[in-house]
């Protein structure tokens, strides 16, 4: 098992190029199961979750060829298998995304209940209810979802009691081959969903309301779609993380290959803290702040402040003047990084879903343990400003969602080494 050894308080400067968005790539990879023609997916990030999804597609019978490290050619024309087994699905929760396309195209499938980050309950109930609204029969048997729609799916209204990104994505993919019109009410509005809509539209699916909380889908009444090639949008969470690298070390960094509009909640907060930003069409440059002020954050669904940036801003709060408050409203049990930040010297108090962080704290290098994907990046941020050497263990979490993070940070001047546990 690998760990990262990080020498703190090393000056940083330079630029970093952002990879494709994992959270856009995963549903788009799943959506290729709907297509009867070969499709190329470009700008895929080389991360563990993408490799796991590719392996799952291959196991289902799709033909895959990597044309280069970031471009995958997929043909699901002669799919022969509609069972997503536990061995593959347990590796990540996003595996549930194959449910909608398999059910829509083959009218029956067996999908294991998923795994992934241990952040709260994250129930699949919303996904199952959406499939039932489209006419599917659902049974849970021995840890598997058995879904059937012998006469095919039929368009209907799907009302989500709670906003769900992957739930919206599954409903979209299922509705794309359903007969008639489907309305998804209280849909998630993330840019990743907008890109999935564009991908489905390339195959002839009519979708209205893209980017809003209500989507109207007219399904294609064929056995499959003819999807076109697509390039994955830049990863807004990776971009936000590198902006936080600049912010916590108070360095001048340029973040390239991004869509600034997708980062507005993050950039607005950085400006409020005291940073100057030069925002261009596809880049943002962050400049050192004279003084970094404490802040308050409440995580919300897009376009609000992303829960996936909460941990990184908690690390940043330790270096700001005053007391910062972070309220997590989307997931329970998402402050596991707080106790690890405390090992580095952070002063953090927790009360249910609210964290209070005392700023202007001198952090000291220590051994810490990553508990989930974003927590791992927060610990690395803190280690960059800690006095001495830190070691971040269990970085397999990091590898699920960040491409070559240590290489990208080292190119800025950092001293980060990936080593093997003894």
Image (cartoon, helix red, strand yellow):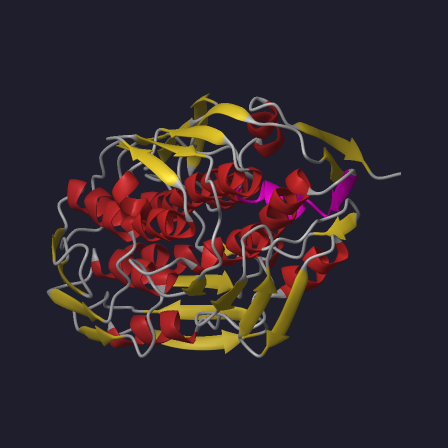
Q: Give the quarter of the figure containing the C terminus.
A: top right
Q: Nearer the viewer, residue 277 or 133?
A: 277
Q: In this view, does 50 lie to the left or right of 9?
A: left
Across and down, in percent, residue 349 comes to 64, 71
Residue 91 shows in the view: no
Q: Which of 157 and 340 is in front in this view?
A: 340
Outermost residue to the front: 290
169 lies above or below 70: below
Q: Does the magenta stretch include residue 390?
A: yes
Across and down, in percent, residue 146 comes to 45, 70
Q: How many marks?
A: 0
Q: Which residue is drawn at 71% across and 43% down?
A: 386
Q: Is residue 264 left or right of residue 141?
A: left
Quarter of the image holding residue 285? Answer: top left
Quarter of the image holding residue 322? Answer: bottom right
Q: Residue at x 72, y 29 (%)?
A: 417
The region drawn magenta spans: 389-401
């Amino acid at each position: 098992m690998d760990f990262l050894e990080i020498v703190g308080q090393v000056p940083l400067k330079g630029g970093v190029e952002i990879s494709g968005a994992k959270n856009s790539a995963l549903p788009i990879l799943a959506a290729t199961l709907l297509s009867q023609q070969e499709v190329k997916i470009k700008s895929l990030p080389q991360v563990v979750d993408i490799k796991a999804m590719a392996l799952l597609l291959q196991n289902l019978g799709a033909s895959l060829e990597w044309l280069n490290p970031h471009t995958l050619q997929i043909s699901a024309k002669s799919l022969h298998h509609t069972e997503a087994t536990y061995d593959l699905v347990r590796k990540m929760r996003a595996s549930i995304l194959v449910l909608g396309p398999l059910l829509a195209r083959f009218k029956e499938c067996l999908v294991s209940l998923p795994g992934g980050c241990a952040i709260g309950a994250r129930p699949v109930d919303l996904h199952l209810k959406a499939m039932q609204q489209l006419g599917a029969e659902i049974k849970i048997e021995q840890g598997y979802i058995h879904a059937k729609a012998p006469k095919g799916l039929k368009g209907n209204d799907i009302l989500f009691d709670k906003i769900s990104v992957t739930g919206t994505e599954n409903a979209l993919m299922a509705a794309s081959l359903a007969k008639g019109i489907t309305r998804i009410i209280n849909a998630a509005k993330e840019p990743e969903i907008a890109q999935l809509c564009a991908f489905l539209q390339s195959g002839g699916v009519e979708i209205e309301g893209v980017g809003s909380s209500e989507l109207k889908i007219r399904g294609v009444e064929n056995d499959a779609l003819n999807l076109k090639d697509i390039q994955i949008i830049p990863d807004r969470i990776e971009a936000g993380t590198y902006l936080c690298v600049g912010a916590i070390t108070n360095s001048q960094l340029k973040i390239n290959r991004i869509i600034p509009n997708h980062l507005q909640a993050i950039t607005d907060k950085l400006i409020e803290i005291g940073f100057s930003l030069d925002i261009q069409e596809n880049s943002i440059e962050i400049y050192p702040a004279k003084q970094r002020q404490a802040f308050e954050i409440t995580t919300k669904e897009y376009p609000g402040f992303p829960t996936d940036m909460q941990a990184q801003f908690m690390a940043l709060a330790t270096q700001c003047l005053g007391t910062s408050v972070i309220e997590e409203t989307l997931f329970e049990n998402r402050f596991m990084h707080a106790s690890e930040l405390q090992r580095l010297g952070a002063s953090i108090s927790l009360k249910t879903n609210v964290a209070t962080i005392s700023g202007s704290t001198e952090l000291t290098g220590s051994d810490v343990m990553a508990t989930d994907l974003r927590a791992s990046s927060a610990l690395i941020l803190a280690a960059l400003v800690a006095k001495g050497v830190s070691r971040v263990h269990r970085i397999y979490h990091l590898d699920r969602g960040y491409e070559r993070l240590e290489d990208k940070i080292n190119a800025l001047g950092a001293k980060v080494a990936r080593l093997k546990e003894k």
